[in-house]
Image (cartoon, grey):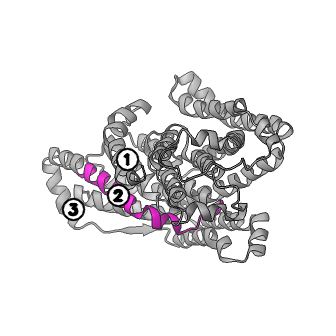
Amino acid sequence: MSSLGILELPALIASSGKYEAVQLWMSIPFVLLLALIAVMPLTGKKWKHLWERFYPAISLIFGLAVAAYYIPLVPGGAGDVWHSLKEYISFIALVGSLFVISGGIAIRLPGEATPRTNVLFLLIGAVLANFIGTTGASMVLIRPWMQINKYRLSAFHIVFFIFIVSNVGGALTPIGDPPLYIGYLRGVDFFWIFEQANLPWVFVVGALLAAFYLIDLRSFRKAGVRSKIAEESAERMTLSVRGVKNIGYLLVVVCAVFLPGQVSVPVREVLETYFVREIVMVLAAVASYFQTHPEIHRENNFNFEPIREVGYLFIGIFLTMVPALAYLTTHGPQIAETLESPAHYYFASGALSGFLDNTPTYANFFDLIRSIIPAEIPATEQVHWMTNPDNPAYNLLVVAISLGSVFFGALTYIGNGPNFMVKSIAESENVKMPSFFGYIFRYSLPILVPVLIFCAWVFLGSSQ
């Protein structure tokens, strides 16, 4: 391990019994489920219809099947499954509450956008994603984004919205993107990621905004007379917001995220045991839903199908990924030998995030890093050790998987939860979106990937 030579591989943190019991084949349902999620929506109408009808049952069957053989075969298996279920509850409470509350906020910007106003809009969306999540920001902003660009709305407008607002924008806080929230649940300090990722965030967001501006400027000039009308209307553009009280409910969710970290350990254990944080989030969402005027929900075309899909699919993902997490933990030293630098962790976690889903990918790599911590470090100190700048090798590894999991979530439609939601909303407004592979070859590979490679070279290359 050339660049991580200072890391001495420790004895396995798991018992030898668990090491022998956890086998790679146990992760097959995890891989199959993720493959179905990626492929089935892209098949012919018959198979797509069957998938849309039966995916809740398929996801649950896969998850329960894994639990059924993992618990009796692996020492401590029941504890592993329960831990994953707890993380699922926390994950779905955050994502679901943000989705519901944001659905009660209607933003309107009378007028038509110019390339400059579009860049400002996307920048605001990237910042907002860190306060209400990429899901919340995407749901709040996608309709006004399409509205102000309706006179020349094209697929690239939606794709760059997915790049910036639905993914890379949320890289600064645990609220911003689900992988970072999973890290927070595992002990990463709330403000740590902001301290470590602010410069890469500025670089990637800035580069994508510059690329978007050049493409949008060409589109704007092609609009001819219409572009002059847009310039005049942009000067008179004013913001109107309905459902303002729901902003208060968003703040309640944000405060609930902070809650466990602000109390003593005994109180924190009670809060986590009885899911107090998650209950607060759900109550805020319920109150928001019933206090929002139905007209606002109709204006936003709000319905529960997107979050229903996320809920069913992710219960299967969180259960089926238990063996994969255990395998990475128990076999971490051997796997780590193939990853020789933070950049390798960045690209490995990023590639899996783009095609499999960034939340379980982050969880897997987080546990992989924990598995190579020196054996003398107590379990209660491991996360602090990993994220302490005084241990730059470990620190950079966590930075690498944090950036990789969030940034590369934009690589495909299935990389992050909001991606498919935004695509569906755009298609409902008759925007012709690229296919799964069209998205990759027309936008991700020629635009996104070079930016992310350069980011690794600038911010992670010094560690190689």
C-alpha gap between disc 2 and disc 1: 18 Å
Q: What's the magenta bit mostly, secondary-structure-wise?
A: helix
Mark 2 lies on residue? 122
Q: Residues within 10 Å of mark 2 (few under 14, many from 20)?
A: many
Q: Residue at x 48, y 40 (%)?
A: 354
| Residue 316 at x, y percent in the picture | 69, 40
Answer above or below: position of 148 versus 158: below
Question: Could one spot residue 96 in this view of the protein?
Answer: yes
Q: Residue at x 62, y 67 (%)?
A: 257
* Amino acid type shown at disc 2: Leu
Q: Secondary structure at mark 3?
A: helix
Picture disc at residue 90 = none
Q: Residues within 10 Å of mark 3 (few under 14, many from 20)?
A: some
Indicate left or right for 459 with 371 as reference. left
**Frontmost residue, 401 versus 432:** 401
* Amino acid type shown at disc 1: Leu
| Residue 414 at x, y percent in the picture | 51, 40
**Frontmost residue, 211 versus 450:** 450
C-alpha gap between disc 3 and disc 2: 19 Å
Q: Quadrant of residue 444?
A: top left
* Amino acid type shown at disc 3: Ser
Q: Secondary structure at mark 2?
A: helix
**First to last magenta residue range:** 186-213
**Frontmost residue, 352 versus 132:** 352
